[in-house]
Image (cartoon, grey):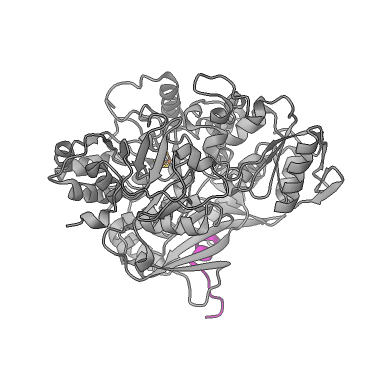
Amino acid sequence: MNNPKTLFDKIWDAHVVREVPGDRQVLYIDRHFIHEVTSPQAFAGLKERGLPIFRKEKIVATADHNIPTINQHLPITEPLSRKQVDTLTDNCSEFDIPLFGMGHDKQGIVHVIGPEQGITKPGMTIVCGDSHTSTHGAFGSIAFGIGTSQVEQVMASQSLILDRPKTMRITIDGNLSAGVSAKDIILYIISKLTTSGGTGYFVEYAGEAIRALSMEARMTICNMSIEMGARGGMIAPDDTTYTYVNGREHAPKGDQWDAALAYWKTLYTDDGAKFDAEYNYDAADISPMITYGTNPGMGIAINGVVPQLKDHKALDYMGLNEGEYLVGKEVQHVFIGSCTNARIEDLRQVADFVKGKHRAANIKVMVVPGSKAVEAQAKEEGLDQVFLSAGFELRSPGCSACLGMNADKIPAGEYCVSTSNRNFEGRQGPGARTLLASPLTAAATAIYGKIVDVRHYLS
Amino acid sequence: MEPINQLTSTAVPLPIEDVDTDQIIPARFLKAVTKHGFGDNLFRDWRYDNTDQPIPDFVLNNDTYHGSVLVAGKNFGCGSSREHAAWALADYGFKVVISSFFADIFKGNAMNNGIVPITVSDAQLDEIFKSIEADPETQFDLDLNQQTLKVNGLVINFDIDAYKKDCLIKGHDDIDYLISLKSEIESFEANQVIY
Ligand code: SF4
C-alpha cells in the first residue's frame, strides 16, 4: 500500500473542511451531545450574539449530572440543580432540540444513551462538553470532550478549529484471566502511562484481548482514555460493532445499512501505518486493579501494596500508608454506576455474583443504572429482585455519586469502592475517599464488607 | 474576550503536581447558568475548610503572594472538560498560568477565555518557584507577541500555537472565524455521505 493510514487519520481526514493558517484545521462535527452543566453558557452566548443554531438536527440533549436518583417523578428540590435542568429544557424547546430529560423513557447518562439508541456509529466525529465523550470511540469514531466555548462554536457552525493530535496505539494481546475485566485493563494501562502519558494523543486500542471484548466492555476502555490525558480513544469497528449497532433506533436500515457497512469495513489501521507512540501489553499480566490514591493513575494490582511515593499528599487524603495491603481493608460504601460501568452487562455481572448472597452489614450499596433503558432491562431480567434480596439499593439513572452534583455523596473520610472513573479529592463529595475498581471487585467488596481479591471467590 | 499582549505582575505559586479540574472548581459549584462568580470558589476545598473558614496555609489565603500570574506544578488542569475551571481562574483575576505541562482540554479552554498558558521546562519551573520563594515580589514580564517571559534575569522563549496567539492578542474567539466559513461548511456537507 502506498500511503498506509491509521484508523484515526482516515476519519479525521474525511472531516477536514479546510486548513487554518498556524497549523490548525477546521473539522466538521457529525454529532453533538449536550447536557445541562456545560451548555447553558453556550446557549446564552449564542443568544447574546443573535446567532441561530446551524444544524439543530445534529444535537441530542439529556439531563444527567444534576438529577436525583430517587423520586424522579417529583420536581428537583435543590434549587440550583433544578434551575440548571430547567434552563436546558427551556433552551431545547426554544431551539427545537430533542431532549431526553428527567422522566423521559430514554433519559440517561449522555455516554450511555448515544450508543444504546444507535446514535453513535462508526466513522463519525462526535463531541460533547464532557471529557468522557471518549466513550463513543469504542465504535470506531473520533469522539472527544470539548469546553463550553466550543459547544457554542459547534452550535453556531457544526465545526471546530483544532490542532491535529498525535496518534498512539496500545496493543493488548493474549487472554484475560477469570475475574479480570475491561475496567482492569484500562486501570492497568493508566497506571503504566500515568495521568499525563496520553496528553496530546488520540489512542487506538488494538490486539487480541481488545477484539475479544463486547461493545460495552470496549466503551469502558475508551471511556477512561481521558484519564491518561488523551484526547480520546478508539477501537476499529468489527462484527461485534456491527451486530451491536444493527437494528437500533437510529441505525441505518435496508440499502442504507448495506452502504454504511461497506464504508465501515474500510475503517481500520492499514498495515504499515505509523503511530507517534506505541505500547504493547499482555492481557495475562493484568490482575483485578484498584486505586489507592487521588488520581486514576495511582492504581495497583488488587493483591499488591501501596507503593512508595515522593509526595504524601494523596496518601494523607486517603488515610493510607505506603506498604499497606488494600485487600482486607474495610470500606463503608460501594457505588456501582457512571458512564464507565453502569450498562446492562455491568449490572448482569454484579447480579450474577451477588445472587443468593447478602451485603455485609457495614456497607451501603448504591446501584445506579446508566439509563432508563438499562433500568428497564434490568427489571425485565429480574436483576432488581436480586439486588433487593442482596440489600443493594437500585436507584434511577443519572451521574449520581460519580461526581456528587446531586444528593448522592460519600461522607467525608469514608471509603467508597466505586466503578466510576475518577478518584480525585472530593470527587464523590467533600472529603470522600474513592477507590476505583471493576464492577466485579465492587460487588465482592459489598458482600464481604472489605476489599477482596475477587479471583478467590469465583465459583 | 479581552485582548492580552504585554503584562507585568507578581505571581502566586502552587507547587502541586496533577492539579485536576475538580480541585480548581469542585463539581458542586458547577450549577450556575452564567460564566460569572466562579472565582469565589476557585480551589474551594483547599481554600476553605468545611465550616467555610479560610485555611491559612493555602496560598490564596496568604497575603504575601498576589498578582495575575499563577505558577503551578506539572500536569495542571487534568480531568474534566469543564470550562468552569478557566472561568474560575479568569474571574479570580489570573491572566497567565505557568506550568511545565498542561492537560489538553484545559489549555484550550484557558486560551478561549483570554488566559495565556505558558509551558516551561521542569528546570525552568523549579527556578521560577525558587525565585518566588526567595522574593514574593519577583516580577514576571510577559510579551505574548514576542513569546517571551522574563523572570528575575531568566528569559524564557515559549511556544504557542500561531493561530491561538493571534486570537489572544486581538481578543477574538474562534466563533467569528467559523461563522465566516458558513458556505464552505455547507459545501462540505453537500459532499459528505453520513449514515
Ligand atoms: S457518569 Fe460521571 S464521568 Fe460520566 S458523564 Fe456523568 S459525571 Fe461525567
Q: How many labels, in total?
A: 0
Examine the image and state in which quarter residue A412 appears: top left
Q: Is residue A395 within the magenta segment?
A: no
Measuring 72% from the left and 43% from the top, which residue is drawn there? B167
Can residue A244 be seen here? The reply is yes
User: What residue is rendered at 53% in x and 31% in y?
Assistant: A43
Which quarter of the picture shows residue A382?
A: top left
Quarter in which the C terminus of chain A is drawn: bottom left
Q: Residue at x 49, y 66 (%)?
A: A169
Q: Position of residue A422 (x, y in %)?
A: 44, 43
Whether A5 is among the magenta residues is yes
Q: Decide if residue A399 is in sight here.
A: no
Closer to the camera in the image, A403 or A57: A403
For ligand 1, the image quadrant comes to top left
Q: Is residue B79 above or below residue A76?
A: below
Which of B101/A163 is in front?
Answer: B101
Magenta stretch, residue numbers? A1-12
Q: Please tell me whether residue A347 is drawn above or below residue A410 in the rendered image.
A: below
Nearest the camera: A292 or B140? Answer: A292
Would you say B2 lies left or right of A343 here? right
The image shows residue A250 at horizontal and vertical percentages of: 33, 50
Q: Is residue B27 above or below residue A306?
A: above
